[in-house]
Amino acid sequence: MSDLSLTLSAPGVGNGKKFQKYSLPQNVESIKTRVEWSIKPIGVIKVDTLTKIMIQGSPVDDGSSAPSGVATPVNGDGAVVPAVLAEGSTPADGKVAFGAFPYRINGVSYNKAADAVGVVFSAAHKIAASKFGAIAVNINAAGDINTQINSAAQTDTLSHDTALFALQKVQQAEFTPPADYIRIGYILIANDASLWTANTDDLTDGSDVTTSTFFDLTSSYHEIDTYTFDSDDFLRGKGTFFLTETKPNKYVRLALTEFTGDGKITIEADFLSMNSA
């Protein structure tokens, strides 16, 4: 059984898993990886030449798992530099502002222009009086900003006793962004003695909240290697390539960064040798 296996069917990566992650043993100095792939046409048209396989590595689990804002990626999904989330220039509006930043989704690069005025929250999120709550901020390939709470309904009232509990709730692994979005940050609110409601109340310290703190997230994954299919690959329908990585990674992940056409592609990766300290 392969260490990593990824199968996607046309039309596009939206029909399958984009990534699969593998945990490496501790103190790994280098790895040698064998990647095997096969393409099966569906109907007459095969997958076209935009298809790429990417192997990525990271010293930490995932850039979106902690609000550090300090990881700088060579490659990988997420904001490449911090979005610099902040309150909008008109505080009474209660909007979320940000600076200009590049980001990546499924290995494709995009750029988001700065917006000092800010955007509205995606729902009327609520935080109970004298309690804490954390709101995630996401973006998609079109540059649409989405806000999201980890609750059954987006208009539920968050009511955490501490800032730590609020952040732990929004950082849970199963709390993922909507489809085709990536996470770029969090807003942690310590509320005052009245119910706080997004798009009604502001984010100004000492006004409608006690404090609001903005956390920026960046991707921690770097690119180890990328394989781009050519016309001969599609004629053969299968192939193998090898790579060696010497950077000290704790995790590696297999990604199909672009996939168009009418077909199914299966990728399998095995770690053949590892040198450990």
Image (cartoon, grey):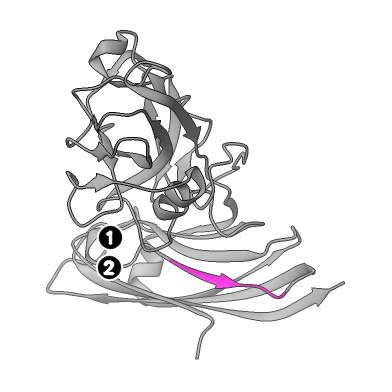
**Circles 1, 2 touching at the beta carbon (< 8 Å):** yes
- State which region is magenta: 20-25
Residue sitting nearer the eye, 205 or 25: 205
x%, y% of residue 69?
Answer: 57, 37
- View extreme (right): residue: 277
Query: How far apart are the two marked residues, 1 and 2, measured between alpha carbons?
Result: 6 Å
Quadrant for the C terminus in the image: bottom right
| Residue occupying the point 53% across, 55% down | 62
Residue sitting nearer the eye, 168 or 179: 168
**Picture quadrant where residue 127 is located:** top left
Count the marks.
2
Tell me: 74 left or right of 151: right
Tell me: 108 left or right of 14: right
**Picture quadrant where residue 263 is located:** bottom left
Residue 16, disc = 2
| Residue 203 against residue 125 in the figure, above or below | above
- View extreme (bottom): residue: 1
Residue 199, disc = none
Residue 13, disc = 1
| Residue occupying the point 22% across, 38% down | 125
Near mark 2 (Cα within 10 A), the count class, few <14, some 14-19 or many ≥20, is some
x%, y% of residue 45?
Answer: 17, 66
